[in-house]
Image (cartoon, rainbow, N blue to C red):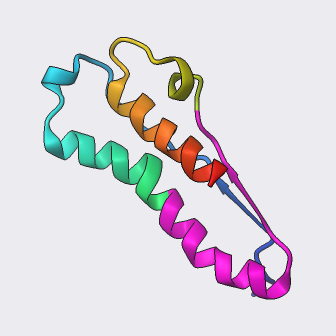
Amino acid sequence: MFGPIDILVNNAGTGIVGPIVQTDEAAFDTVAATNLKCPFYLTAALAPLTVERKLGKVVNITTMFAHIGQSGFATYGATKAALTLLTKS
């Protein structure tokens, strides 16, 4: 059995490359679930344990596209930008 969790690294990421007008809802939902929803809920699940122990770290991996934007990377950039803001919060 493993011991307590001391660190969570949210490193998963996926994206759609292409024009925003060609992105359907199912594809957007997949990217949003991977890049934002999963890290959000994993962090929320870990938070009570780390607060109780007064020990723990969360590392969220984002991208430069979260800050500068790039043609063809709207969904990826938007969801990683949201993860950046989640991290700051």
* Residue in the image at 36% along x and 53% along y: 33
Compared across the picture, whether 21 is left or right of 75 comes to left
The x and y percentages for residue 31 are 34, 43
Query: In the figure, 20 relative to 11: above or below?
Result: above
Count of numbered labels shown in the rendering: 0
The quarter of the picture where residue 8 lies is: bottom right
* Residue in the image at 85% along x and 80% along y: 54
The x and y percentages for residue 18 are 26, 17
Foreground residue, 69 or 4?
A: 69
Dominant secondary-structure state across the stretch colored magenta: helix
The quarter of the picture where residue 19 lies is: top left
- Seen as rendered, the residue at the extreme top is 71
Foreground residue, 61 or 81?
A: 81
Which span is picked out in magenta?
Answer: 39-62
Q: Is residue 66 magenta?
A: no
The x and y percentages for residue 11 are 61, 47
Image quadrant in which the N terminus is located: bottom right
- Seen as rendered, the residue at the extreme front is 89
Query: In the figure, 68 relative to 75: above or below?
Result: above
The quarter of the picture where residue 49 lies is: bottom right
Compared across the picture, whether 21 is left or right of 52 comes to left
Compared across the picture, whether 78 is left or right of 9 comes to left
Foreground residue, 17 or 70?
A: 70
* Residue in the image at 22% along x and 23% along y: 20
Compared across the picture, whether 23 is left or right of 48 comes to left
* Residue in the image at 62% along x and 55% along y: 89
